[in-house]
Image (cartoon, rainbow, N blue to C red):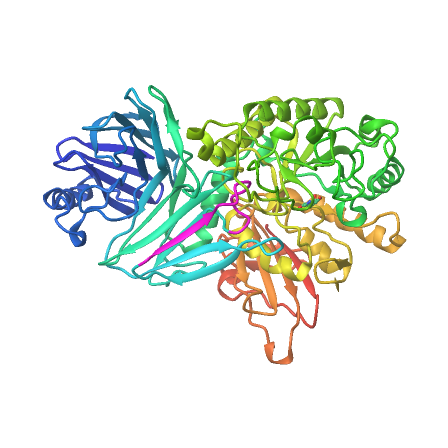
Amino acid sequence: MEIQYMENARIFHLRAGEMSYAFGVDALGRLVHLYWGEALRHASSLEALVPVAKLACELPGVDANNACDFEVPTREPFDYGEPILWPRFASGERGLRLIYRTHRIERGHLTVVLADEYAHMEVEAHYKMWRDLPLLSRWLVIRNTGAEPVEMQAVKSAAWHLCAGHDYRLTHLSGNWGCEYTKNQLMLTQSRVVLQNSRLTCAAAQQVPFFAIDRNGEATETMGKVFFGVFHWSGDFEITVEQQFGKRVSVTGGIGTFDSNYAIQPGESFETPAFTGGYSTRGFERMSEILYDWQLDALMPRGCSSAKAHAVRPVIYNSWYPFEFNVSEENCMALIDRCAEIGVEMFVIDDGWMPGRVDASAGLGDWIADPKRFPHGLEFISDACHRKNLQFGLWVEPEMVNPDSDLYRAHPDWVIRIDGRPMTLQRNQLVLNLARDDVRDWIIDWLDDLIETCRLDYLKWDMNRYVSENGWPEAPAADKQSLSIRYTRNLLAIWRHLNERHPDVLFENCASGGGRADFGMVPYADRINRSDNADPVDVMVLHEGFSMLFPPKTAGGAGNIAPDVHHIHGRATPLPFRIHLGMTGSMSIGINLLTVSEEVLEALKEAIAEFKQLRPDLQDAYVYRIASARRHPYALFQYTRRDPKFFALFAFVHGMRCWDLPLPRFEMRGLIPDALYENEQGVRMTGEALMKIGIALSLKGDFDSVLQVWRAV
Ligand code: DGJ
């Protein structure tokens, strides 16, 4: 990791691992992008950028074809691309002309200070590196140095530019409830493609705030240069991928602009969320490795001892799939006994524990245990768990309220609404206005109390609706459109508080499944509900998209060993198949342990014991997507420990036909060529043979699955 400043040419060069990033200050004082790509390791290589910078200077955008690529585009003269800052001053005038003032270089962090020559506005452009990972986090701090408020109509975080003149392909992950992280790929044309969410309460439900771009559409899992980025915000966002004439491609990203406007008061600043870009020299697989390393070694919650991110995740039992709202002291106590018998490590009561919460029509907002169904309170259940050496966890949905609740009766003004218009219910619930600091503080208070009095080891934060009437009647007119920004800021502030106050509690980020599987949440959540869809055939596909971004230990959910018939398709699947899929993530069991046979209990007990043995090697492993269920009647995932002296091969089959046979030998990846690996049957192969000759598998029919474990000897 290195930051260089070439004083004479006024060029900045940031080198992080296999990536270099460079920009310069042109003759007019503007920050002009110069290079993003493979690391430039020789000082003299940078000389080659000098003419590029000069060229940019000499052509201060005489026409659109020759316009420069700006680090902080604000529609400079002749730059017609997407701006990332768009202020409206008290005079009604819009736009900015940012000129370099000074810069600071600290360890791994460059700050360039810019200011408008005419308007009273200062902007700090931040560039932060993550040791030797080929990543660069960028954000802006905008300071109003004038005497009047400034309305920000666009307040985004960064612009990334690719070398012009090439054909590029965009990869993005979209979806819906039950089918998150669908991989889409399209060749760019002269147009703007906007990846966005404007549902306010989440980022990732329909579109993960992520992009990847490769040249000519040639990158594969293992080959090719891939430029990628993730945006750190769990709310409305916009990532605009723009190709202008001459195949000039740039990606701008930040907080969404739909119905969004933020007034910066005189003397105040606005800090944007970060937008991190990265670069892989080895296709999408290396991109995933970089993202995993970053999360495991730097981003994920560290806990008290800093070891939390690397600690194994407990085997969870969750009440949702088998019992839904029908939870009570009686069935919980019986389940706790069963859980302890089969080796479960944490018992979780999902939705349904509050007064009146016997279905989705009531209970949200009144965060006390239903005295009818839990006569001795949740502390009693918690103690029972702890006595049996089980951890105890609870589900909450803090942002929501049912109209039929004491909370709503006491504070009808706390919900997001437009006075004079009907309020829309979704799942019988309304959204609390988290943009209000009193609502934020109320949530913090009752959550702290709940976690402490119930001695919770785990909290699952759910969120089950979007916002349709973005209204805030109590706010002054100038602040009304800041609703979504203030909402998300307070949401993340609560999560930050929870982590600081309860550093060793395990937090699960759930938003109707993977609705908040985004990098805004990564620093605060130990587990992500990958999806509410735990149908194993769908999980074969879902896990492919999820694993592009997130490491195995974060793949949570209410029961990734799901009931034999999962409600989404009504499809029955055999237990061994579900168990193997359950092992690919952070294991959770969502089966009715009170009604299953002794054989099923025994099988679960064995599976849990086996998983516990493998878990330290599986949970932080890189996931290599060897074969995709999108193309084949099978999916193969290779879990390779980061050292890489261990790997496990998971194979799943659904719908194999005669003409799908014979299967190829499957070539492993990322092993030590000279090491000798041995599997549990005593078969030995060198890393080289495993990678070049491959492994033969005999898979057939439906719901066949294999788990092979290999260790270097
Ligand atoms: C949606 C979540 O994704 C599920 O896991 C479950 O917690 C339900 N909500 C409860 O209402």
Label tally: 0
The magenta region covers 191-206
Q: Is residue 165 positioned above or below 513 on the image?
A: below
**Residue drawn at (53%, 30%) of the image:** 435
Query: Which image quarter holds the N terminus?
Result: top left
Q: Main secondary structure of the magenta part?
A: loop
Whether residue 224 is visible here, answered yes or no, is yes
Ligand 1, by image quadrant, is top right
Closest to the observer: 686 or 607?
607
> Does 18 sit left or right of 422 as displayed?
left
Which residue in the rendered view is the most extreme toward the left? 58
Residue 158 in the image: x percent, y percent? 34, 40
Closest to the observer: 646 or 497?
497
Magenta span includes 202? yes
**Residue drawn at (35%, 33%) of the image:** 152
Residue 252 in the image: x percent, y percent? 34, 45
